[in-house]
Image (cartoon, rainbow, N blue to C red):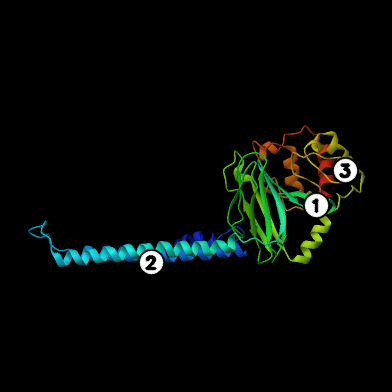
Amino acid sequence: MRTALVLFATLPLAACAGRQSVLDPQGLQSSQILHTIFIFLTVAAAVWIAVVVVLGVSMLRRKRPADQPLALHQGFERTSGRVVFVLGLATLVIVLGLSIVSYAGQRTIFAKDENALTLKIIGHQWWWEVRYEADSPHRSFVTANEIRIPTGQPVKVELESADVIHSFWVPSLTGKMDLITGQKNELQFTAKNAGVYRGQCAEFCGLQHAHMAFAVLALPPDEFGRWRDHENQSANSPTDQLGKQGEALFRARGCALCHNISGTLAGGQLGPDLTHIGSRTTIAAGTLPNTPATLAAWIADPQHIKPGTLMPKMPLQSGELIAILHYLEQLK
Ligand code: CUA
């Protein structure tokens, strides 16, 4: 019995920490949101407890009905009037107070910093296009489903959609913001600590909405700088015969019509950019860890893993699949 109770208590508490939790904030904005939640929760709990106590006391001390229920007692009426007035005033003060707390919190949550690192994020059914745009095109690159940011520096994400409405949400770092076709929304956040945080589309956007996740990797600034320099470079050329064969098959079998690999003839723009696919932690928008086995399963039959996904099942011989897999694995 005791074990069962402990286990039962652990289940909800386990949700309080981890890489996707509003209760374990790792960003300036998420800390502010949690702070605001606690103030609201404390005030609401205090009001609720007061109401329940008064209700309980009045039930215990209930008097017998008077002989003349319609008779008014002036003294009692006057006291009741005062109590109602004071409670009405208290309600007004509490509502105004919580509004002020809420607006004050928004100063942090919606703060704009001119020196923020700017990313453009475009929602697709069902993956995330991430564009690091710099003044010089040589410093700009595109990736997918994984956002790397420096810790301690504000990051501005410009949010757009290529099809339906999606919603960008990284609970550990900040609140939600929708991605809407034809409109540019903005959100700024700052990661306080290095780590991997999970993000999830928070607006129902079709069959695979639940499999539209992404990872935010907050890195120390120097490590972020090294990653960015590396990401700016074109894809690695295959070093061996099997890899070269894979590169040719990638074009011959139609992969290149949808996917871009910088520095090669593959220039498709419909699906995720694969220039550095080998260095990403997940595939299929956070659905699977990026391993040779999962990548092979995905290429062989994406519809089995993510029914409805826009990536079709390509007819590949097993030798061709192995060559393409070997090529993609080298794109670190
Ligand atoms: Cu995109 Cu839900």
Q: In this figure, which residue is indicated by the disc labeled 3?
A: 264
Assign a secondary structure to mark 3. Answer: loop
Between 298 and 312, the residue placed more toward the observer is 312
Q: Which amino acid lies under the numbered mark 2 shown in the image of this protein?
A: Ala
**Residue reaching furthest left?**
67
292 vs 39, left or right, is right
Residue 65: image location, x then y, percent: 12, 59
The numbered mark, 2 or 3, whose residue comes first in the sequence reads: 2
Name the quarter where the N terminus is drawn: bottom left
* Residue at left offset 89%, top offset 40%: 245
Residue type highlighted by circle 1: Ser
The residue closer to the viewer here, 41 or 85, is: 85
**Can the viewer see residue 3 in this picture?**
no
Q: Which mark is residue 300?
A: none
Q: Which residue is mark 1?
A: 140
Q: Residues within 10 Å of mark 1 (few under 14, many from 20)?
A: some
Picture quadrant of residue 180: top right
Going from the N terminus, do you reach mark 1 or mark 2 first?
2
Which one is in front, 110 or 170? 110
**Residue 46: image tag:** 2
Q: CA distance from mark 2 to mark 3?
A: 64 Å
Amino acid type for the residue under numbered disc 3: Thr
How many numbered discs, if any? 3
Report the residue at 34% width, 64% height from top: 89
Query: Residue 196's quadrant in the figure?
Result: bottom right
Q: Nearer the viewer, mark 3 or mark 1?
A: 1
